[in-house]
Amino acid sequence: MPDDIVLKVEDLHKSYGNITVLKGVSFEVRRGETKIICGPSGSGKSTLLRCLNLITRPDKGRIWLEGEEITNRNVNINKVRQKIGFVFQEFNLFNHLTALRNVSIGLEVVKRLKKEEARKIALEMLRKVGLEEHAYKYPAELSGGQKQRVAIARALAMNPAIIFYDEPTSALDPQLIGEVLEVMKALAREKVTSIVVTHEMGFAQSVGDEILFMYDGKIIERGPPLEVIQNPKCEQTKRFFQKIHELYARQER
Amino acid sequence: MSVYSKLLRLMVTVWDYLPYILEGVWWTLGLVAGGLALGFIIGLPLSIAQVYGHRILKAIVEVYAWFFRSVPLLVLLFLFYWGIFPALGYKLDPLTCSILVLGFRSGGYQSQIFRGAIQSIGEGQYIAARTLGMSKLQGIYHIILPQALRIAFPGWVNEYAIILKDSAICFVLGVMEILTRTRYVVMATLEPLLPYFIAGGLFIILTYGGTKLVNIVYEKTKIPGLIGRI
Ligand SMILES: Nc1ncnc2c1ncn2[C@@H]1O[C@H](COP(=O)(O)OP(=O)(O)OP(=O)(O)O)[C@@H](O)[C@H]1O
Ligand SMILES: [Mg+2]
């Protein structure tokens, strides 16, 4: 496998009972790349991300992270997950910890850094997302946009090989989406490798390297963002972006 | 004899016995502290097992909690003191046996208090901890428990008040707590009114004082926006 492939997925399958959610998903992510995943609700985007960091066990298929096959039964999944940052739609910050401790706790507990060292890195990460002066606030004292930026700093602090974002702006008020997207764009331009599940087409067009369009558990169309968004080939893709456009047009009015 | 002189004589006799009754406070507190502590040691792991454990483990915890919450304390005391411990070859003194039974039983109740607290935190933070690379135990220890214990605090204070009142039932095994001593005084003086009033008063003071004290600790460990809203 070439050196610059961070993540490789081959023929991933996942069912819950008798509903098959993933029906054979394959793709690769190169170093520095920003992959956009979109598709209608229920198409399996979140399930895919959860399978990729083994929060959910896939039924079939293989995944390689930096050349190591992580679907192998005897890999240490805690070691694997350290290398994958995860940003959730609902932030999932640790409510009993300050912003700073939210970012440093992974370094202390998982990477076993000294408290002082972890603190220094955490402060640096908070500065990166523009929240240095809020370091000692608790999650309940932060706005949604600030919470999500802390969550991004928390993921970054672990120095992961790749970051997954699962609809990071869907739970935010419209006026707070911008500040989060700005941080994500800056990271993408710094060539932080990522997979972003999002319906923010502006974001996809400005920093996305490729769009994977999911429908019914499969990637049915893929290509450069501009092409897929403006010139979709599949009927389902066309309909999907049509709807997104209408939605945004309505919001802007 | 006038009512007044009768009352006066009563107070004088009981006054003589007051230190004897008061000494029971230590025994009562011993029962409560022992029972609460043992209940905590049993209840917390059980609650974790019930939320995060294997299906079979969950079932075992459920049966445990159900048993100790369904059988009356009086029956439990007799069962363990005369039945289970002797059958296992242990001859325990009444105090030890009472503390164990109060603890086993409180463990059942406390497991449910903690389980509710853990479940109220929601799965998201636990999953976030796991995605950072924390193990199951690290996630529970660093993320879930610090919050769950705070959320469980009011329920736990309530458990203190309940176990305090329940501890009086241990008089049936002759533990020298408040009620046992009060009954002896009544037998000796043949005056039931004032001694039982005193016993009741002592329980009120212990309930009120204890909850007050614990609430001070609770306030001190508050987190902005986290438990203030509950
Ligand atoms: N733990 C689970 N148990 C059973 N079914 C599940 C579970 N998780 C997801 N599903 C089902 O899998 C399907 C895909 O869900 P998933 O959350 O991956 O979709 P999604 O593309 O992320 O949708 P959305 O845009 O709404 O977030 C849905 O039909 C969902 O009901
Ligand atoms: Mg989803």
Image (cartoon, coloured by chain):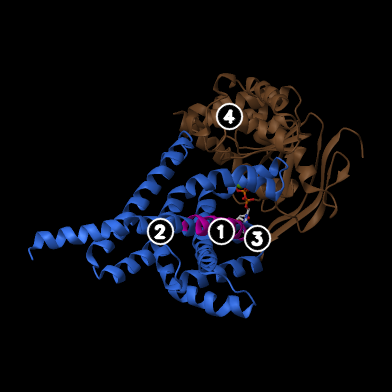
Chain colours: A brown, B blue
Secondary structure at numbered mark 3: loop
- For the residue with label 3, is its CB less than 8 Å from the closest atom of ligand 1? no
Q: Does A124 sit above or below residue B124? A: above
**Of labels 1 and 2, the one closer to you:** 2
Task: Name the kind of residue labelled 1 in the image.
Answer: Leu
Whether residue A238 is visible: yes
Q: Chain of mark 3?
A: B
Among the 4 quarters of the image, the one containing residue B147: top right
Query: Which image quadrant: the N terminus of chain B?
Result: bottom left
Among the 4 quarters of the image, the one containing residue B165: bottom left
Q: Chain of mark 4?
A: A
**Span colored in magenta:** B32-49
At 16% across and 58% down in the image, what residue appears?
B8
Query: Which image quadrant: the C terminus of chain B?
Result: top left
> Disc 2 designates what residue?
B24
Does the magenta-highlighted stretch encompass residue B47?
yes
Q: Is residue B77 left or right of residue B16?
A: right
How many numbered circles are shown?
4
Magenta region, main secondary structure: helix
* Residue B38 image label: 1
Question: Residue B59 at what x, y percent from top left?
Answer: 60, 69
Task: Name the kind of residue labelled 2 in the image.
Answer: Gly
Q: Are marks 3 and 4 on the same chain?
A: no
Q: Nearer the viewer, residue A119 or A58?
A: A119
